Protein backbone atom coordinates (compact mmCIF):
# COMPACT_ATOMS: atom_id res chain seq x y z
CA UNK A 1 0.00 0.00 0.00
CA UNK A 2 2.82 2.41 0.82
CA UNK A 3 4.50 1.65 -2.50
CA UNK A 4 1.32 2.49 -4.39
CA UNK A 5 0.98 5.76 -2.52
CA UNK A 6 4.60 6.73 -3.15
CA UNK A 7 4.21 5.82 -6.82
CA UNK A 8 1.07 7.92 -7.12
CA UNK A 9 2.71 10.94 -5.48
CA UNK A 10 5.84 10.53 -7.57
CA UNK A 11 3.81 10.46 -10.79
CA UNK A 12 1.77 13.47 -9.67
CA UNK A 13 4.99 15.43 -9.12
CA UNK A 14 6.28 14.37 -12.53
CA UNK A 15 2.98 15.38 -14.12
CA UNK A 16 3.28 18.85 -12.59
CA UNK A 17 6.86 19.06 -13.83
CA UNK A 18 5.95 18.08 -17.39
CA UNK A 19 2.91 20.34 -17.44
CA UNK A 20 5.16 23.27 -16.52
CA UNK A 21 7.94 22.20 -18.86
CA UNK A 22 5.65 22.07 -21.89
CA UNK A 23 5.02 25.78 -21.56
CA UNK A 24 8.68 26.70 -21.12
CA UNK A 25 10.71 25.06 -23.83
CA UNK A 26 11.39 22.00 -25.93
CA UNK A 27 14.66 21.48 -24.04
CA UNK A 28 12.70 20.27 -21.02
CA UNK A 29 11.10 17.55 -23.14
CA UNK A 30 14.56 16.10 -23.73
CA UNK A 31 15.36 16.24 -20.00
CA UNK A 32 12.06 14.57 -19.20
CA UNK A 33 12.60 11.84 -21.78
CA UNK A 34 16.03 11.04 -20.35
CA UNK A 35 15.38 11.54 -16.64
CA UNK A 36 11.93 10.00 -16.24
CA UNK A 37 13.01 6.36 -16.59
CA UNK A 38 16.13 6.92 -14.48
CA UNK A 39 14.31 8.65 -11.63
CA UNK A 40 11.53 6.08 -11.67
CA UNK A 41 14.16 3.36 -11.47
CA UNK A 42 15.74 5.06 -8.44
CA UNK A 43 12.58 5.11 -6.33
CA UNK A 44 11.37 1.68 -7.45
CA UNK A 45 14.67 -0.08 -6.73
CA UNK A 46 15.17 1.67 -3.39
CA UNK A 47 11.63 0.87 -2.22
CA UNK A 48 11.99 -2.71 -3.44
CA UNK A 49 15.24 -3.21 -1.52
CA UNK A 50 13.80 -1.71 1.66
CA UNK A 51 10.77 -3.99 1.35
CA UNK A 52 12.97 -7.05 0.91
CA UNK A 53 15.05 -6.17 3.96
CA UNK A 54 11.91 -5.92 6.12
CA UNK A 55 10.62 -9.24 4.76
CA UNK A 56 13.93 -10.92 5.55
CA UNK A 57 13.86 -9.62 9.12
CA UNK A 58 10.34 -10.91 9.68
CA UNK A 59 11.23 -14.36 8.34
CA UNK A 60 14.32 -14.49 10.56
CA UNK A 61 12.21 -13.65 13.61
CA UNK A 62 9.73 -16.41 12.70
CA UNK A 63 12.53 -18.97 12.44
CA UNK A 64 13.95 -17.85 15.81
CA UNK A 65 10.55 -18.26 17.45
CA UNK A 66 10.16 -21.80 16.05
CA UNK A 67 13.62 -22.85 17.29
Image (cartoon, rainbow, N blue to C red):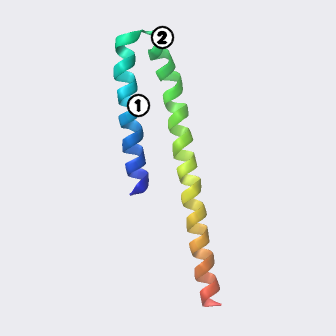
Q: Earlier in the sequence, mark 2 or mark 1?
A: 1
- Distance (Cα) linking label 2 and label 1: 16 Å
Quadrant into which the C terminus falls: bottom right
Which residue has dot 2 on it? 27
Q: How many marks?
A: 2
Percent position of residue 13, x then y: 39, 33
Q: Are marks 2 and 1 in contact (CB under 8 Å)?
A: no
Residue 38 located left or right of residue 24: right
Residue 55, percent from left and from top: 56, 67
Q: Quadrant of residue 11?
A: top left
The correct choice, above or below, for 13 with respect to 45 in the image is above
| 53 versus 39 height, above or below | below
Outermost residue, bottom direction?
67
Label 1 crowd bin: few (<14), some (14–19), many (20+), radius 10 Å: some
Q: Secondary structure at mark 2?
A: helix
Q: Is residue 59 above or below residue 22?
A: below
Residue at 53%, 23% in the rendered image: 34
Q: What SS does tag 1 mark? A: helix
Point out which mark residue 44 bears. Answer: none
Q: In the displayed structure, does residue 56 sit left or right of residue 6? A: right
Residue designated by label 1: 14
Task: Answer with the quarter of the image where residue 24 lies.
Answer: top left
Q: Nearer the viewer, residue 16 or 30?
A: 16
Residue at x 48% of width, y 29% of height? 36
Would you identify the image quadrant in which residue 2 lies? bottom left
Q: Position of residue 58 (x, y in %)?
A: 57, 73
Amino acid sequence: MIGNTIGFLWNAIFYAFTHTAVHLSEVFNVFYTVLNPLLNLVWIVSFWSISLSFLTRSKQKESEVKS
